[in-house]
């Protein structure tokens, strides 16, 4: 794996997280609650 492969993977991951963050910001507060509850339940189960 060379430098270009690592930077491309990082850029793709950063773009995905950024897109998800933008999507989540547009959601109402109720969606945030369900999202957080889902993370907590998943943490308990897995």
Image (spheres, grey):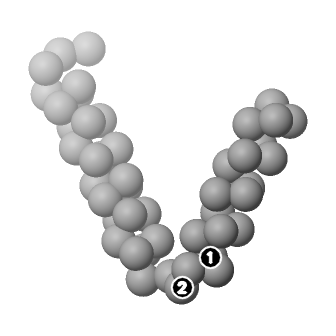
Give me the disc on residue 45. none
- Total marks shown come to 2
> In this view of the protein, which residue sits in the foreground, 7 or 31?
31
| Labelled pair 1, 2 in contact (Cβ < 8 Å) | yes
Tell me if mark 1 has few (under 14), some (14-19) or many (20+) residues whose alpha carbon lies within 10 angstroms of its own.
few
Identity of the residue drawn at 42% across and 63% down: 20
Disc number at residue 31?
A: 1
Left or right relative to 9: residue 43: right
Q: Secondary structure at mark 2?
A: loop
Number of the label disc, if any, that sits on residue 28 = 2
Q: Quadrant of residue 28?
A: bottom right
> What's the residue at 40%, 75% (across, down)?
25
Residue 16, x across and y down, in percent: 37, 55
The percent coordinates of residue 6 (x first, y second) are 23, 25
Please name the residue shown 72% across and 46% down the image. 40
User: What residue appears at the point 28 percent right and 47 percent down from the top-left corner?
Assistant: 14
Q: Quadrant of residue 10?
A: top left
- Quarter of the rendering occupied by the N terminus: top left
Q: Is residue 29 left or right of residue 7?
A: right
31 shown above or below 41: below
Can you say whether 30 is above or below 17 in the image? below
């Amino acid at each position: 794996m060379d430098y270009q492969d690592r930077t491309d993977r990082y850029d793709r991951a950063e773009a995905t997280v950024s897109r998800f963050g933008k999507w989540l910001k547009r959601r109402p507060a109720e969606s945030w609650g369900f999202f957080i509850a889902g993370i907590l339940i998943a943490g308990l189960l897995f």
